[in-house]
Image (tube, helix red, strand yellow):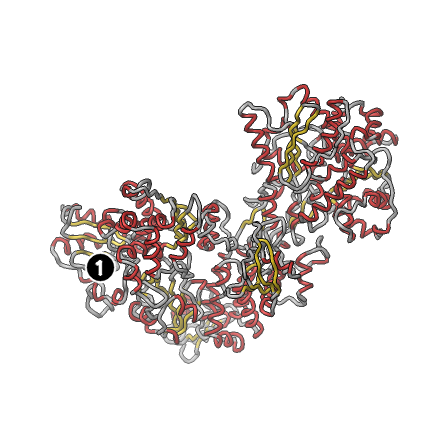
């Protein structure tokens, strides 16, 4: 977008916008939100739905506001009787190809199509119902895909191919039989899908949704044989409030503690605690390699299950550089079923471990290999997303807004600011640097705000001075941004050169976990920004902002794990990776 | 080049090839060799003669004998009688009707009103021999352009000619070229759109089969003019003969230094490669075509950006249709001025049509713009089959509309066709008579568009299907007056809100039949009647008791055994089981079966 300004009239109102601004965006400055179903701020306009057509004076054809840039002197009309009729007919056509079972739909009440149908006053089915005769895809643990509900807007295809570079989804078939599916008519489980769920987060309707496991959670809560325990991820606390009318970025951690207790959990832990633990393990792993075996670098972070899956599928040659540290979710679950169970004096299978995540891939992670059952039984029993917890809350009747604030259980609930920033891109890196500095120098880093690794830029680089030694780091988020980073490492390795970076952080979802596939709907960069601000605010407000200073972390090592990367830590907190070839069928 | 006493031209177009013209060619060659005539007679396999109705066609020069419906077995006789004894074979010569005498080629009605610019070499030269193309001024235009003309002068010549794109929309060709020329870029492309897909249309295929070099030459000229060095011909894989001949032509042109680096000793470099399409209709749409070349699913993208500015791999790209390109060398050789004298005020030059349907002389024709439909159908086409009454003609394929009898005398050009609710399209022209039902015809086109919709935008994907569903309802006598409004509403939405030309025009057949044949719709809806008798659900066959002599012929023919009766006594048709195939009507020699 250039800096030149364009003057135009929208509905006779003079507006000025930057060159390259679409009519859709420009209309907002004239207080008009042109109806659309396929457009999403994160994506290039696919221009498929046909609802945003507008008239431009002097042009015969109507144009799509999403895909047409403003021109100097343009006179645009965004609504009149003709446009209204065309849009309404188009909407009726879309509805004729979409099931009417709104009441049974996961997106009921939070569906862009439903909203438009309401706004356009659609009161009867004007056209014959013609549904797509294709079955649901329930082959993955994380996502349910119902082609019948798909309106072919193409958002998921674009986000999967261009933002995530996964290429699990494609349009196949023609005409009315055109559906979104993995190429080759495969099931999602047979495709390269990494279950990041960005498709579900971008779907305007209920065609791709998270596998709803709220019932499983209730069942566990009410099982007299079980002790239900819960943890929730850093990014949940700055987005959960949105589901109750709150602002993005509002920190509702203490209300969530109280909510989870009232739902019936016997212990409420915080994944932020185990984020600190991850830093101890991964940070120590890094320090060891950095000081003793620099040619084995870079170390690449492994706490994001979408990224782990992606690397195992697309970059098996990088497996040696992958941190063996498990994700915070798996560390906390492992400790809950060992350390905590032992403390309670119960057998491990008594613990019913639930985690609340901003992520759909976490549903996959809990059974990705045997290491996820290091306690002797499956370490995490059920994962629900932020969205599922919101529904669960509402169905329980608990009035979230009015809840008193509470605390997490002390044992594995205390966290440092370094733990909380795991929820944003760059956070793991920043947290790791805060502790690595100490581990290497035995001195504390003074300015612990590592700003070069913050923000929504796709790939961020920084050079950290650790008492004269330079540590080069890179941070990528949104899987499409990974390629350039990995290729540079590969090139250097192939040529026998020094690695361009010593430490690399990757998060599959744009913005990191705050933009995860299981977060409340309606994510845009503005929303990501606000959630990010919430996370950094939580960090700022924390008394302890370095993982290694978290007293409960120190305690768990003293009481149970001995020291980072100890034999026991390895058994419980580390894992291994394998090549998972795709398209074998 | 060696000269011969006689030249035997055998049509090698796809139509004639499928009627074994390949065998005719082989047999002729063999017979000529057997008679030791190979130094006197040359057999040439040419492109399409256009008169496909009468194929396979063999023409003998210099006497211009025009043999039609030739069979492989006729080869020996042609050699023995005609070439050796000089006695033309009367039974093979074209006759207007069974009982009239043979007609000399110059007097054949089919060719009388035609004017061949695009098809100038089709049926004349061997498309697999570059020398024959060169002998007919081939590659003179590129030479003229490279040695005597500036880029602006070429553009000016095309502008003067008034040439508009022959692919459908009729956008001025020089403007397209100019957009690309003006856009600064290190790389630019020329793309030839040979993804001809309208049902019944084969203009572009015939040009590529019959005169491939004209397209290569034109692409080079375009490349020089806009500053491109690479061209792609996007052609559907189901045109194997055209692809084969293009490949031969490209190889020959490279060998002659007419493609590649330093063409004709100048510093102009240009090469051409072929890209095969899988046959999706939508890939004829420019943006979808580019997606397909790039290896993506052929789906249209929003415009702007226009391909001329940001096209193939993001580079400025001229996309011209085959027929548009075939005009270019002639325009350069004879001048834009000459070309602009052909045609009407706003539509210059000629147009090739694939004339099919209920017309006596179906085939490929080329006429000056402004020729009337009446001239095309009745003079060139020889009128309606069996002397039936003309009802309508469909131009522009599934994107076009019907032209009723009242517009038979309208000069055909881009603007007139749009004005009467149809469009030029790529040049399919299907003639319909009184036996054609307009609802049935519209259904046919909708079916095509519904199947060929890429599925991307909702107005086209769902709208087309809903239109078809309503039309099916009407053809079954289940339509209501509200359905007319639904057809209109959907058509409007599709026209205005579809993403690409395919969707924007897919409702044209509905809108134009509603405009000109609304009565027929109302008959189907109100009276549950299909006058043309095409809508099976609204038709019944009955046996008139008084006329039936009980010969049992109909009962024996009936494929579902629903006709019963004793021998020599009147028969009856079980209406519940009848599938309305009409065989009984055809079989009865006593006019006892009637269609209601």
Left or right of A13 in this view: B299: left
Q: Position of residue A468 (x, y in %)?
A: 68, 23
Using the rendered view, name the quadrant where residue B56 is placed: bottom left
Q: Is residue B250 above or below residue A309?
A: below
In which chain is the residue bearing label 1? Answer: B
Left or right of A141 in this view: A557: right
Near mark 1 (Cα within 10 A), the count class, few <14, some 14-19 or many ≥20, is many
Q: Residue at x 55, y 44 (%)?
A: A183
Q: Position of residue B451 (x, y in %)?
A: 50, 57
Q: Is residue B580 above or below residue B42?
A: below
Q: Nearer the viewer, residue B133 or A144?
A: B133
In terms of secondary structure, where does tag 1 sit?
strand
Q: Residue at x 52, y 53 (%)?
A: B301
Which residue has dot 1 on it? B67
Using the rendered view, name the quadrant where residue B343 is placed: bottom left
Residue B28 visible, this angle: yes
Q: Position of residue A219 (x, y in %)?
A: 81, 44
Residue B23 visible, this angle: no
């Amino acid at each position: 977008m250039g800096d030149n300004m364009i003057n135009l009239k929208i509905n006779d109102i003079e507006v000025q916008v930057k060159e390259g601004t679409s009519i859709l965006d420009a209309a907002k400055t004239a207080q008009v939100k042109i109806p659309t179903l396929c457009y999403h701020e994160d994506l290039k306009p696919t221009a498929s739905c046909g609802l945003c057509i507008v008239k431009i004076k002097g042009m015969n054809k109507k144009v799509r506001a999403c895909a047409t840039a403003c021109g100097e002197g343009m006179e645009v009309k965004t609504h009149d009787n003709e446009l209204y009729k065309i849009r309404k007919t188009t909407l009726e056509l879309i509805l004729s190809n979409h099931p009417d079972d709104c009441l049974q739909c996961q997106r009921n009440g939070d569906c862009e199509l439903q909203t438009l149908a309401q706004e356009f006053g659609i009161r009867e089915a004007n056209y014959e119902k013609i549904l797509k005769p294709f079955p649901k895809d329930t082959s993955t643990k994380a996502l349910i895909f119902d082609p019948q509900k798909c309106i072919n807007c193409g958002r998921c295809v674009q986000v999967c191919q261009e933002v995530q570079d996964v290429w699990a989804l494609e349009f196949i078939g023609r005409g009315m039989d055109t559906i979104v599916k993995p190429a080759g008519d495969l099931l999602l489980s047979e495709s390269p899908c990494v279950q990041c769920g960005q498709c579900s987060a971008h779907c305007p309707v209920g065609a791709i949704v998270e596998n709803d496991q709220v019932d499983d959670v209730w069942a566990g809560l009410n099982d007299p044989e079980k002790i239900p325990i819960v943890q929730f991820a850093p990014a949940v606390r700055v987005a959960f409030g949105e589901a109750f009318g709150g602002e993005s970025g509002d920190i509702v951690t203490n209300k969530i503690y109280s909510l989870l207790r009232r739902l019936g959990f016997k212990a409420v832990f915080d994944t932020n605690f185990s984020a600190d633990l991850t830093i101890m393990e991964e940070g120590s792993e890094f320090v060891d390699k950095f000081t003793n075996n620099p040619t084995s670098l870079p170390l690449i972070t492994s706490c994001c299950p979408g990224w782990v899956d992606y690397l195992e599928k697309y970059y098996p040659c990088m497996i040696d550089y992958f941190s063996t540290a498990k994700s915070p979710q798996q560390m906390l679950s492992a400790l809950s079923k060992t350390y905590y169970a032992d403390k309670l004096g119960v057998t491990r299978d008594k613990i019913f471990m639930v985690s609340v995540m901003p992520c759909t891939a976490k549903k996959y992670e809990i059974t990705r290999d045997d290491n996820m059952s290091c306690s002797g039984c499956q370490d995490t029993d059920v994962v629900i997303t932020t969205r599922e917890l919101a529904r669960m809350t509402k169905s329980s009747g608990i009035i979230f807004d009015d809840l008193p604030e509470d605390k997490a259980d002390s044992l594995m609930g205390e966290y440092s600011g370094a733990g909380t920033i795991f929820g944003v891109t760059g956070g793991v890196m920043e947290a790791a640097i805060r502790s690595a500095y100490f581990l290497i120098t035995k001195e504390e880093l003074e300015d612990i705000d590592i700003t070069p690794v913050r923000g929504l830029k796709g790939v961020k680089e920084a050079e950290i001075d650790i008492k004269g030694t330079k540590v080069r780091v890179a941070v990528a988020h949104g899987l499409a941004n990974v390629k350039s980073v990995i290729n540079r490492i590969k090139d250097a390795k192939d040529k026998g050169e020094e690695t361009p970076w010593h430490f690399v952080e990757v998060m599959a979802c744009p913005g990191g976990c705050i933009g995860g596939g299981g977060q409340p709907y309606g994510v845009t960069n503005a929303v990501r920004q606000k959630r990010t601000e919430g996370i950094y605010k939580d960090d700022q407000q924390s008394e302890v902002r370095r993982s290694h200073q978290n007293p409960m972390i120190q305690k768990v090592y003293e009481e149970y794990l001995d020291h980072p990367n100890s034999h026991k830590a390895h058994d419980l907190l580390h894992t291994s990776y394998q090549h998972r070839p795709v398209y074998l069928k | 080049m060696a000269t011969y006493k006689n030249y035997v031209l055998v049509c090698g177009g796809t139509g004639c090839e499928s009627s074994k013209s390949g065998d005719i060619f082989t047999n002729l060659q063999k017979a000529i060799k057997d008679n030791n005539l190979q130094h006197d007679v040359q057999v040439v396999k040419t492109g399409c003669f256009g008169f496909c109705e009468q194929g396979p066609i063999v023409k003998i020069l210099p006497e211009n004998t025009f043999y039609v419906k030739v069979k492989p077995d006729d080869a020996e006789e042609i050699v023995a009688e005609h070439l050796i004894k000089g006695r033309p074979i009367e039974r093979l010569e074209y006759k207007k009707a069974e009982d009239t005498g043979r007609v000399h080629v110059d007097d054949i009605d089919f060719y009388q009103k035609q004017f061949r610019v695009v098809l100038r070499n089709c049926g004349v030269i061997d498309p697999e021999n570059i020398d024959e193309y060169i002998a007919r001024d081939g590659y003179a235009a590129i030479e003229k352009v490279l040695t005597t003309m500036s880029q602006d002068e070429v553009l000016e010549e095309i502008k003067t000619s008034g040439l508009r794109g022959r692919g459908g929309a009729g956008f001025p060709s020089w403007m397209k070229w100019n957009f690309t020329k003006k856009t600064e870029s290190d790389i630019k492309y020329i793309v030839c759109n040979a993804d001809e897909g309208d049902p019944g249309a084969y203009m572009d295929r015939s040009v590529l089969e019959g005169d491939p070099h004209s397209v290569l030459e034109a692409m080079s000229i375009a490349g020089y003019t806009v500053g491109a060095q690479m061209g792609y011909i996007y052609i559907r894989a189901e045109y194997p003969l055209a692809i084969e001949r293009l490949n031969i032509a490209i190889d020959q042109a490279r060998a002659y230094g007419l493609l590649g680096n330093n063409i004709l000793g100048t510093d102009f470099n240009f090469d051409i490669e072929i890209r095969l399409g899988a046959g999706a209709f939508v890939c004829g749409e420019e943006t979808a075509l580019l997606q397909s070349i790039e290896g993506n699913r052929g789906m249209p993208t929003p415009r702007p950006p226009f391909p001329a500015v940001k096209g193939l791999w993001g580079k400025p790209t001229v996309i011209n249709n085959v027929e548009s390109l075939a005009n270019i060398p002639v325009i350069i050789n004879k001048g834009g001025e000459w070309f602009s004298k052909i045609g009407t005020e706003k539509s210059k030059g000629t147009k090739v049509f694939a004339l099919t349907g209920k017309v006596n002389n179906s085939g490929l024709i080329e006429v000056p713009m402004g020729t009337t439909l009446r001239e095309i159908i009745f003079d060139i086409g020889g009128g309606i089959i069996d002397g039936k009454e003309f009802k309508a003609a469909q131009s522009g394929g599934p994107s076009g509309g019907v032209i009723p009898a009242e517009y038979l005398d309208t000069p055909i050009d881009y603007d007139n066709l749009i004005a009467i609710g149809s469009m030029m399209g790529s040049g399919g022209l299907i003639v319909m008579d009184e036996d054609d039902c307009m609802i049935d015809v519209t259904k046919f086109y909708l079916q095509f568009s519904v199947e060929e919709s890429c599925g991307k935008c909702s107005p086209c994907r769902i709208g087309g299907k809903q239109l078809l569903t309503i039309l099916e309802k009407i053809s079954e006598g289940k339509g209501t007056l509200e359905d007319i409004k639904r057809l209109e509403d959907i058509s409007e939405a599709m026209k205005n809100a579809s993403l690409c030309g395919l969707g924007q025009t897919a409702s044209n057949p509905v809108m134009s039949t509603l405009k000109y044949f609304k009565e027929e719709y109302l008959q189907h809806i109100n009276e549950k009647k299909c006058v043309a008798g095409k809508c099976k659900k609204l038709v019944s066959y009955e046996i008139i008791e008084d006329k039936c002599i009980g010969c049992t012929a109909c009962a024996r023919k009936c494929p579902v055994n629903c006709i019963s009766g004793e021998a020599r006594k009147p028969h009856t048709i079980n209406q519940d089981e009848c599938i309305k195939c009409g065989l009984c009507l055809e079989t009865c020699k006593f006019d006892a079966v009637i269609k209601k």
